[in-house]
């Protein structure tokens, strides 16, 4: 689709290919395989001589529509969809790294990404150094001759630390290193890593892209030479996105911009209110002037995003008081939903790492994370205040 259109137009229109029925809404192609006109065409499709669908582990028209729509939104030449965010990250690493290669990644990565890079991949000879997201010097010091990839996620979860994408790209490219950015928190509506020079963008489509907590999905976008490598791994290993999930995600993308903007506005209002609350010790939100990287965030992102973290005055008992007195906010580790969610990271998402690791990562016992949804802010505030007022 013509890329001159604005993002909200592309989110609604890009990627659709109408069938002979001329359907208005995108068709859902639930088929595992495709038929050929004759033996010669079957042979040509299998050999790749003729383009076209063969089997849905390789390609599917509904999945292709989702890939195209997301690619256009991210400003990517191509995009490959996967069954989940983790399978997107796995496919990226399996496609681009080999035994002996080295990765530099940020300490604040999503927990499962840390496990994948820090534990599982080491069994296959791919080693990762974890460094602070906010120190470009630390990334530079971690580069080795065999470094292949920088992997970062900005803002980080849950402390919303910002990585300077342009600065890390300049550093990486000077040394022949690829840069991949997990853009799950901002989505292309708030931040476009490829415009800042990153080579690859990764998504957990499960979060904001769906936005309504219905399906798992993921994607990798970038130059076609790179995404083709990811596709080669994917079509053989099999963590492909299902057509049904792609269809749900296509519909999710249509409302992405209005959701992200409304949820970010709610998050900012909550963050300001929390910052002024007498029972709150500290608020982490990139849209607040008090955020240590407010200026970088303002340059790199269109807004602070929908995730707010805050520390209550006290420790676990006080934080749990807030959680246990909520009647509206959902107590769940998921995020990116229209329903606001509340998480106590130290006892859930970060519960399995040691207390020392938690302390080093700034995950205190009093820390809570809110992923703002679309409810009225006044209702969210009064729900949080039920517990805060008891501290
Ligand atoms: C949830 C999440 C993932 C993993 O995605 P799944 O779809 O759950 O596999 C990766 N990165 C970030 C930042 C996430 O929040």
Image: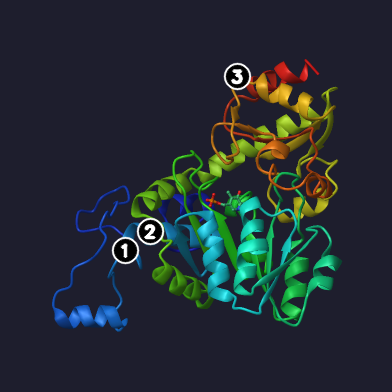
**Which mark is on residue 327?**
3
Q: Position of residue 84 (x, y in %)?
A: 49, 54
Q: Position of residue 118 (x, y in %)?
A: 68, 62
Answer with mark 1 or mark 3, whichever residue precedes in sequence. Answer: 1
Q: Which quarter of the rendering shows the C terminus? A: top right
Q: Residues within 10 Å of mark 2 (few under 14, many from 20)?
A: many
Residue 192 shows in the view = no
The quarter of the displayed image where residue 287 is located: top right
Q: Residue at x 29, y 51 (%)?
A: 28
- Decide which of 66, 46 is in the foreground and name it: 46
Determine contact: label 2, label 1, CB under 8 Å.
yes
The quarter of the displayed image where residue 265 is located: top right
Determine contact: label 1, label 3, CB under 8 Å.
no
Name the secondary structure under disc 2: helix
Q: Is residue 69 left or right of residue 221?
A: left
| 57 in relation to 383, above or below | below
The quarter of the displayed image where residue 74 is located: bottom right
Q: Label 2, on which residue?
A: 63
Q: Residue at x 84, y 72 (%)?
A: 141
Q: Label 1, on which residue?
A: 56
């Amino acid at each position: 689709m013509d890329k001159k259109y604005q993002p909200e137009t592309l989110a609604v229109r890009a990627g659709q290919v109408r069938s002979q029925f001329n359907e208005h809404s995108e068709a859902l192609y639930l088929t595992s395989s495709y038929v050929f006109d004759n033996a010669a065409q079957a042979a040509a499709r299998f050999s790749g001589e003729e383009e076209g669908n063969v089997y849905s582990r390789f390609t599917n028209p509904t999945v292709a529509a989702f890939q195209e729509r997301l690619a256009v939104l991210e400003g990517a030449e191509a995009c490959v969809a996967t069954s989940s965010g983790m399978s997107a990250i796995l496919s990226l690493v399996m496609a681009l790294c080999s035994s002996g290669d080295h990765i530099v990644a940020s300490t604040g990565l999503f927990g499962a990404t840390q496990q994948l890079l820090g534990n599982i991949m080491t069994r296959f000879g791919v080693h990762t150094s974890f460094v602070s997201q906010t120190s470009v010097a630390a990334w530079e010091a971690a580069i080795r001759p065999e470094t292949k990839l920088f992997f970062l996620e900005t803002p980080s979860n849950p402390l919303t630390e910002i990585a300077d994408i342009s600065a890390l790209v300049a550093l990486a490219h000077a040394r022949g290193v690829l840069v991949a950015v997990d853009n799950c928190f901002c989505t292309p509506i708030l931040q476009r890593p490829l415009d800042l020079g990153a080579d690859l963008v990764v998504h957990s489509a499960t979060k904001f892209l769906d936005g309504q907590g219905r399906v798992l999905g993921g994607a990798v976008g970038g130059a076609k030479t790179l995404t083709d490598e990811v596709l080669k791994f994917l079509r053989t290993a099999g963590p492909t996105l299902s057509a049904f999930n792609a269809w749900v995600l296509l519909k999710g993308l249509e409302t992405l911009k209005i959701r992200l903007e409304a949820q970010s506005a709610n998050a900012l209002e909550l963050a300001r209110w929390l910052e002024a609350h007498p029972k709150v010790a500290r608020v982490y939100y990139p849209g607040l002037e008090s955020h240590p990287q407010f200026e970088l965030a303002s340059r790199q992102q269109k807004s602070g995003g929908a995730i707010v973290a805050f520390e209550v005055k006290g420790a676990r008992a006080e934080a749990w008081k807030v959680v246990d007195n909520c009647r509206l906010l959902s107590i769940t580790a998921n995020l990116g939903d229209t329903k606001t969610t509340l998480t106590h990271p130290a006892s859930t998402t970060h519960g399995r790492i040691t207390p020392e690791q938690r302390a080093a990562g700034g995950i205190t016992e009093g820390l809570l994370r809110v992923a703002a949804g679309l409810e009225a802010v006044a209702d969210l505030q009064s729900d949080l205040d039920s517990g805060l007022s008891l501290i």
